């Protein structure tokens, strides 16, 4: 078991040994064996996929920006497949802080905006709350930030 309360601050960045796959609009829209994950105290990991993994969909810049004290400024993306669109369903860091240079232009995706996201053969559960984009797998121990009442943690 991985205890998310033992993840470091500032967050760690590590390659993911398992394949990562995302399903939206009834099709695989992204798949890679070259993902990274960011591990931050109290959060399930956030998975970052290279842009080349997104072969089954269109990616369009979306409105808005946000700022992470560790990684820098994020931009948002809309994912389109078939006749469906998931607005602001992904984000990336075009110019991340040096410690996170490996995820430059990689995309993280809100699992709740997709039909399913997989790490290996396991379908993930979205991090609660809708603001954070962590993916919960059965090997994680919480509680996880994002649930009601956790904003002050």
Image (tube, rainbow, N blue to C red):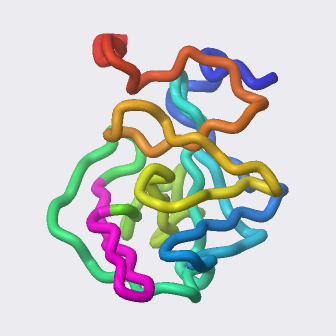
Q: Residue at x 61, y 17 (%)?
A: 142
Percent x, y of residue 81:
43, 84
Screen quadrant of the N terminus: top right
Percent x, y of residue 87:
27, 67
Q: How many marks?
A: 0
Report the residue that reaches farthest toward the left. 63
> As rendered, which of 120 and 92 lies closer to the eye?
120
In the image, the segment drawn in magenta is 73-88
> As rendered, which of 92 and 96 lies closer to the eye?
92
Determine whether, in the image, residue 123 is placed left or right of residue 41. right
Q: Residue at x 58, y 41 (%)?
A: 125
Percent x, y of residue 88:
29, 63
Q: Residue at x 52, y 29 (%)?
A: 43
Q: Is residue 127 above or below residue 98?
A: above
Q: Is residue 118 above or below residue 104?
A: above
* Quarter location, residue 150: top left
Residue 86 inside the magenta-drawn segment: yes
Determine whether, in the image, residue 3 is placed left or right of residue 121. left
Screen quadrant of the C terminus: top left
């Amino acid at each position: 078991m991985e205890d998310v309360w033992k993840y470091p601050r500032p967050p760690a960045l590590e390659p993911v040994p398992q394949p990562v796959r995302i399903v939206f609009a009834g099709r695989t829209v992204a798949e890679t064996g070259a993902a990274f994950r960011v591990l931050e105290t109290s959060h399930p990991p956030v998975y970052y996929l290279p842009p080349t993994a997104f072969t089954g969909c269109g990616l369009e810049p979306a409105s808005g920006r946000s700022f992470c004290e560790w990684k820098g400024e994020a931009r948002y993306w809309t994912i389109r497949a078939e006749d469906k669109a998931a607005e602001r369903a992904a984000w990336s860091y075009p110019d991340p802080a040096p410690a996170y240079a490996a995820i430059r232009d990689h995309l993280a995706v809100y699992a709740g905006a997709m039909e399913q996201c997989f790490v290996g053969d396991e379908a993930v559960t979205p991090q609660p709350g809708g603001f954070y984009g962590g993916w919960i797998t059965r090997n994680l121990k919480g509680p996880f930030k994002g649930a009601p009442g956790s904003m002050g943690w």
